[in-house]
Amino acid sequence: MAEIVFIDKFLVRLALSIFAALIGLIIIGEKRADVYVAVFILIYFIFLALYSPLPREVEGKISLISKILLTIFIIIVAFRILEILAPTVIVTMLGP
């Protein structure tokens, strides 16, 4: 029972933080979807670190989610770095 309350607290606080970040990004006028996704992924990993260790049953499922989110985050960051260092490569990849 205590584990369920712990997970509920984790999920509620994670959802509230993501909602606050969403409102903040809307207020500053951010239009790029990748920025939203990257910020949400960072919030997820911050909360994962704050609430670690999670119960063993949850840990396995979260491990898979974490690997997927980390891969997405790396792709977003790599794309942004490539956009700064070699913008012509991006244009050739995406076409005219």
Image (tube, rainbow, N blue to C red):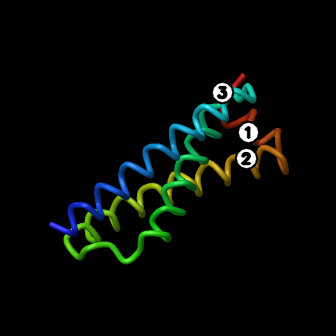
**Which residue is drawn at the image coordinates 52% and 52% (left, top)?**
41
Q: Which mark is residue 80?
A: 2
**Which residue is drawn at the image coordinates 70% and 27% (left, top)?**
27
Q: Is residue 37 left or right of residue 29?
A: left
Q: Can you say whether 10 is above or below 55 in the image?
A: above
In front here: 3 or 45? 3
Q: CA distance from mark 2 to mark 3?
A: 21 Å
- Residue 65 in the image: x percent, y percent? 36, 58
To which quarter of the image does residue 36 belong? top right
* Between discs 1 and 2, the one toward the N terminus: 2
Q: Is residue 1 left or right of residue 67?
A: left
Residue occupied by mark 1: 90
- Report the quarter where the C terminus lies: top right
Q: Can you say whether 5 is above or below 51 in the image?
A: above
Q: Secondary structure at mark 2?
A: helix
- Residue 44 in the image: x percent, y percent? 48, 56
In front here: 69 or 58? 58
User: Of the residues shown, which amino acid type is indicated by label 3?
Assistant: Ile
Q: Is residue 61 left or right of residue 22?
A: left
Residue occupied by mark 3: 26
Q: CA distance from mark 1 to mark 2?
A: 10 Å
